Image (cartoon, grey):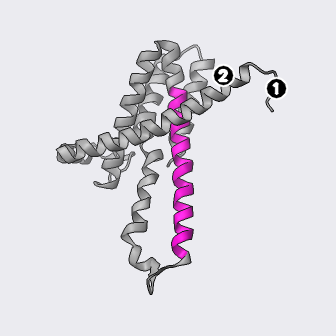
């Protein structure tokens, strides 16, 4: 599921670059991207299993080897998923910046980050899946109504901030590398 946003952003990017008929396809795929985007950063919440299942990992006061395997595996999947999500935002932001301007594109990043935080909340706390927005709209609207609380608001902001920090880090790395390579003819 974490790959879906990158696949969708690649489709949006290809249509933007190569197609003459853009608007309706970009809107549909962009909406689908936003719907599935939270699946990428969502994986970081699987770290909760290391805490919830801590009794399974402890043996006479020592942490078992299984804990460290799970720790590495969950972190690798989380890191990969965060990168996939960040690169998908990067592609969509590029298109928005090309169509409008830098300020609007960064407003999009903020909205996508906070919306991603809300999607994580809906998935982790309310066990809602992205495809249910298409297949079971009444379930989605009921969950949205129940989820509008002050705790949910802070959860969304917290995860939105996390997503935003990860994205800005990736953005700066990409653009710093790009800027430093523009001065040289070859990469060393």
Name the residue: 39% across, 35% down.
113
Which quarter of the rendered picture does the C terminus lie within?
top right
**Secondary element at image label 2:** helix
Q: CA distance from mark 2 to mark 1?
A: 13 Å
Q: Among all residues in the image, which is located at the extreme bottom?
A: 60
Q: Give the image location of residue 103, x and y in percent.
A: 42, 16
**Secondary element at image label 1:** loop
Q: Which residues are magenta?
A: 66-92
Name the residue: 39% across, 62% down.
48
Residue for badge 1: 186
Q: Among all residues in the image, which is located at the extreme front?
A: 61
Q: Residues within 10 Å of mark 2 (few under 14, many from 20)?
A: few
Tell whether position 27 is magenta: no
Q: Give the image location of residue 42, x and y in percent.
A: 42, 49
Vertical relation: 153 (above or below) 65: above
Q: Give the image location of residue 43, x and y in percent.
A: 46, 53
Name the residue: 53% across, 48% down.
81
Question: Between disc 2 and disc 1, whose residue precedes?
Answer: 2
Vertical relation: 32 (above or below) 77: above
Tell me, yes or no, if residue 8 can be seen here.
Answer: no
Q: Residues within 10 Å of mark 1 (few under 14, many from 20)?
A: few
Tag shown at residue 34: none
Name the residue: 72% across, 19% down.
182
**In this view of the protein, which residue sits in the foreground, 131 or 64?**
64
**In this view of the protein, which residue sits in the foreground, 19 or 53?**
53
| Residue 183 location, quadrant | top right
Image side of residue 105 versus residue 141, left or right: right
Vertical relation: 135 (above or below) 27: below
Tell me, yes or no, if residue 43 can be seen here.
Answer: yes
Residue for badge 2: 179
| Residue 119 location, quadrant | top left
Q: Give the image location of residue 181, x and y in percent.
A: 73, 24
């Amino acid at each position: 599921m974490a790959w879906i946003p990158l696949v969708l952003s690649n489709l949006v990017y290809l249509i933007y670059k190569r197609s003459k008929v853009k608007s309706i396809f970009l809107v549909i795929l962009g909406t689908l991207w936003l719907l599935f985007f939270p699946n990428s950063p969502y994986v970081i919440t699987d770290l909760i299993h290391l805490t919830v299942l801590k009794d399974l990992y402890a043996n006479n006061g020592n942490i078992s080897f299984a804990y460290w395997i799970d720790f590495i595996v969950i972190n690798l999947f989380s890191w990969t998923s965060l990168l996939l999500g960040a690169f998908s935002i990067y592609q969509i932001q590029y298109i928005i910046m090309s169509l409008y301007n830098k300020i609007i594109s960064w407003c999009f990043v903020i909205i996508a980050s906070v919306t991603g935080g809300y999607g994580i909340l809906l998935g982790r706390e309310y066990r809602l899946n992205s495809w249910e927005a298409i297949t079971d709209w009444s379930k989605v609207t009921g969950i949205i109504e129940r989820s509008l609380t002050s705790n949910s608001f802070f959860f969304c902001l917290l995860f939105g901030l996390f997503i935003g920090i990860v994205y800005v880090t990736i953005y700066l790395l990409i653009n710093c590398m790009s800027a430093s390579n523009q001065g040289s003819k070859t990469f060393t």
